């Protein structure tokens, strides 16, 4: 007849030996506060269809994605395509995919282009993902020139009048002009590039133009194979399937605005439309700006989100890049040598920038 051994907390059996450990763990849990429930949640789909096995991965920087330095991974999506990923408060770059390691044809992928996503304490930020389905990626072709070639599509149809963006690093979140921007008229492109490492994206705005935020109904995407590493004499195949920004599925919940907003006016204090505001770290305001606004509206209004305190130096001008042209609207915000500083979290500065026609 088998006997069952009983262990009591007062005994020196296994449970008795564990009692000091259990008490220590309880005291440790009481001493170390855990963050309140926070993170991201939403739905994942491919062309409106649900895909099994997709998980959402959170990273601290874009460069961490190809390096595999993941901070957290969600459980696989539920049967309705929904997911939830617990994260402490902070800024994150998010990817949804149904594979680990190297992808293959038929796998699904989405880099959330609204990143970084801000997670606040005791709050779940809504982030949806519009997946693409990956095809074959042939090896680079040897030849006399190096660069990239491929197609930009939307749901297997060539996308016309789209822009191809090439960046040499990801530190600025693909803001600004980048290394080069190439108009793609018929969906096919071939671009000569010197040997190096490049990040490639495609964008097409319904209102036209190379710059400005991606709005609902615009086409865009991040090349899943980023960064593309090109050696001398290599032509890499880069096919980019674009997606559209959707009101409910893809669009995330924006954090509270922090930065500078205001009005751009002309010589008679009249509001001016079509002028951009640029923010620089250096008081000379030379080189690439750190951040730039969309063009001012009919009332001259602009918003310039700034993620750091400063100091910032601002100028407004009509065109983007290159020397100031004859007759171009141009003006600087006079904040002194110290520049403009955002002193508190969530702070907003209201400014007025006066511009005049540039005379050379």
Image (tube, grey):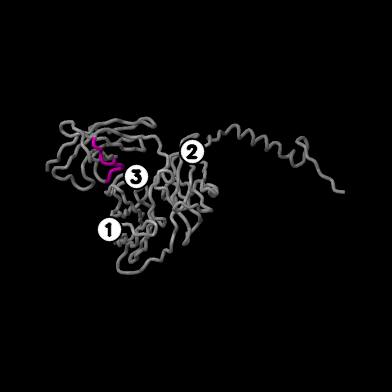
Q: Residue furthest left?
A: 360
The structure residue drawn at horizontal position 77% and vertical position 35%, both measured from the top left corner, is 10
Q: Earlier in the sequence, mark 1 or mark 3?
A: 1
Judge by depth and name the residue closer to the eye, 254 or 321: 254
Instruction: Determine the secondary structure under disc 2.
Output: strand
Q: Earlier in the sequence, mark 2 or mark 3?
A: 2
Judge by depth and name the residue closer to the eye, 246 or 68: 246
Q: How many labels were placed on the picture?
A: 3
Q: Residue furthest right?
A: 1
User: Badge 3: how crowded within 10 Å, few (<14), some, or many (20+)?
Assistant: some
The structure residue drawn at horizontal position 30% and vertical position 54%, both measured from the top left corner, is 162
Judge by depth and name the residue closer to the eye, 251 or 233: 251
Q: Which mark identifies residue 124?
A: 2
Q: Earlier in the sequence, mark 1 or mark 2?
A: 2
Residue ID for mark 3:
215
Q: Which mark identifies residue 185?
A: 1
**From which residue to which does the magenta span run?**
288-298
Rendered location of residue 289, percent (x, y) = 28, 43
Q: How far apart are labels 2 and 3 at the CA level? A: 23 Å
Rendered location of residue 25, percent (x, y) = 64, 36
Q: How far apart are labels 1 and 2 at the CA level? A: 40 Å
Give the number of the mark in front: 1 or 2.
1
Looking at the rendered image, the quarter that the C terminus falls into is top left
Give the number of the mark in front: 2 or 3.
3
Instruction: Determine the secondary structure under disc 3.
Output: loop
Rendered location of residue 143, percent (x, y) = 32, 69
**In the rendered view, does 5 fall on the left or right side of 258?**
right
Q: Quadrant of residue 237?
A: bottom left
């Amino acid at each position: 007849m088998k006997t069952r051994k009983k262990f009591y907390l007062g005994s020196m059996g296994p449970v008795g030996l564990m009692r000091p450990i259990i008490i220590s763990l309880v005291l440790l849990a009481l001493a170390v506060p855990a963050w309140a429930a926070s993170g991201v949640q939403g739905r994942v789909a491919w062309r409106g269809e649900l895909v099994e096995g997709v998980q959402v991965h959170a990273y601290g920087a874009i460069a961490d994605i190809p390096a595999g330095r993941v901070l957290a991974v969600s459980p696989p999506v539920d049967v309705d395509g929904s997911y939830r990923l617990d994260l402490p408060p902070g800024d994150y770059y998010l990817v949804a995919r149904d594979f680990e390691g190297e992808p293959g044809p038929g796998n699904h992928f989405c880099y959330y282009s609204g990143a970084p996503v801000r997670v606040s304490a005791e709050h779940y930020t809504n982030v949806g993902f519009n997946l693409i389905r990956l095809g074959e990626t042939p090896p680079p072709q040897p030849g006399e020139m190096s660069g990239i070639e491929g197609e930009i599509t939307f749901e297997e149809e060539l996308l016309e009048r789209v822009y191809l963006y090439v960046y040499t690093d990801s530190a600025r979140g693909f803001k600004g002009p980048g290394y080069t921007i190439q108009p793609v008229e018929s969906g096919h492109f071939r671009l000569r590039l010197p040997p190096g490492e490049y990040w490639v994206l495609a964008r097409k705005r319904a209102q036209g133009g190379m710059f400005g935020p991606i709005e609902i109904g615009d086409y865009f995407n991040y090349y899943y194979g980023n960064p593309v590493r090109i050696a001398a004499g290599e032509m890499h195949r880069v096919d980019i399937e674009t997606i559209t920004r959707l009101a409910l599925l893809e669009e995330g919940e924006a954090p509270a605005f922090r930065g500078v907003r205001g009005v751009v006016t002309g010589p008679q204090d009249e509001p001016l439309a079509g002028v951009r505001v640029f923010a620089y770290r250096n008081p000379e305001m030379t080189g690439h700006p750190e951040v730039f606004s969309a063009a001012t509206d009919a009332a001259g209004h602009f918003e310039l989100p700034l993620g750091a305190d400063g100091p910032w130096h601002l100028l407004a001008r009509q065109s983007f890049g290159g020397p100031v042209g004859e007759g171009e609207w141009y003006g600087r915000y006079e904040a002194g040598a110290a520049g403009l500083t955002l002193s508190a979290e969530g702070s907003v500065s209201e400014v007025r920038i006066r511009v005049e026609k540039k005379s050379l």
